[in-house]
Amino acid sequence: MSGTSGGSAAAGSGPAAQRPIRVLIADDQRVVRDGLVLLIGTLDGTEVVGAAKDGAEAVQLAEQLRPDVVLMDLNMPVLDGTAATAALRERVPDCAVLVLTTYADDDSVFPALRAGARGYLTKDADGDQVETAIRNVHSGRTWLDPIVQERLVAALLPGGPAAATAHDAAPVAAGPGAHSACDPTAERALPDGLTPREAEVLALIAEGLSNAQICARLVVSQATVKTHINRIFAKIGARDRAQAVRYAYRNDLAGRG
């Protein structure tokens, strides 16, 4: 969908008036997409120029419409938000990508930022936060959700919870006092396509930690932990935690704390 008019496209008048910020929205869920169109359309000085249902359509529309900001979901069909962000960096370099997604785990945050996203918000952000983020990334500044800032800081600390999650980087030895359940797995391939973060969560399950305890250990939300566990169970074919624990011991992923 393209050419969606924002309610405030004509905001301002006279010599000092500025062109509205042109926003393209990309989200595979129609109810979310339509809600964002309505929200952005009510903001002063913004204009929704289009809406895409997947990453491939977002790239195509961005090339046609040349928006200032793309509000990008990550988990989309055809082409995911991270890949679409990387494509936009190459094809529409003047466009700023602001990620707006459900996920704030390391496997979502770091790849998106590496791909070129200038901002990152979770979907529990309110309208004021979304507006502030749009204006900041449009101005060339970075805008990150507080929980994302915490993840980035944690990644820089010796032995922090994100120390072993850069799955597209070379293995890095942890510093003194590091505590990561999956550090030893960095030197070998993980089974069944598990990511380092998923291996870490699996090790904590094998250690007997509840979801709430895993949240506290990794400094992530309950939703993030549930997402990791669902992905782990799907990859390893486990129906419950008992089967996951057996898998962890059988593949030497337990007892790594």
Image (cartoon, grey):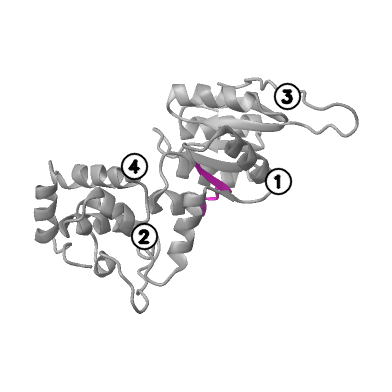
Q: In x, y percent, where is residue 241?
A: 14, 47
Taking the spot 40% from the left edge, 54% from the top edge, the residue there is 106
Say whether disc 3 or disc 1 marks the residue closer to the N-terminus.
3
Please tell me how crowded label 1 is: few (under 14), some (14-19), or many (20+) other residues with Cα within 10 Å.
few
Say whether disc 4 or disc 3 marks the residue closer to the N-terminus.
3
Q: Could you tell me how far apart the alpha carbons at marks 3 and 1 are, in whole angstroms? A: 18 Å
Question: Which one is in front in this view, the residue at disc 1 or the one at disc 4?
Answer: 4
Q: Helix, strand, or loop for circle 3?
A: loop
Are the residues at dot 1 and dot 4 in contact (C-beta closer than 8 Å)? no
Residue 198 in view here: no
Specify the quadrant of the image occupied by residue 201. bottom left
Q: Amino acid at mark 2?
A: Thr
Q: Which mark is residue 224?
A: none
Say whether residue 42 is magenta. no
Say whether disc 1 or disc 4 marks the residue closer to the N-terminus.
1
Magenta region: which residues? 113-121
Taking the spot 35% from the left edge, 64% from the top edge, the residue there is 164
Looking at the image, residue 47 sits to the left or right of residue 105; the answer is right
**Residue of label 3:** 9
**Frontmost residue, 99 versus 179:** 179
Q: Could you tell me how far apart the alpha carbons at marks 4 and 2 are, in whole angstroms? A: 18 Å
Question: Which one is in front in this view, the residue at disc 4 or the one at disc 3?
Answer: 4
Residue 5 in view here: yes
**Residue of label 2:** 165
Q: Amino acid at mark 1?
A: Ser
**Residue of label 4:** 223
Please tell me how crowded label 2 is: few (under 14), some (14-19), or many (20+) other residues with Cα within 10 Å.
many
Q: In x, y percent, where is residue 36?
A: 54, 27
Question: Which one is in front in this view, the residue at disc 4 or the one at disc 2?
Answer: 4
Say whether residue 120 is magenta. yes
Q: Could you tell me how far apart the alpha carbons at marks 4 and 3 are, in whole angstroms? A: 36 Å
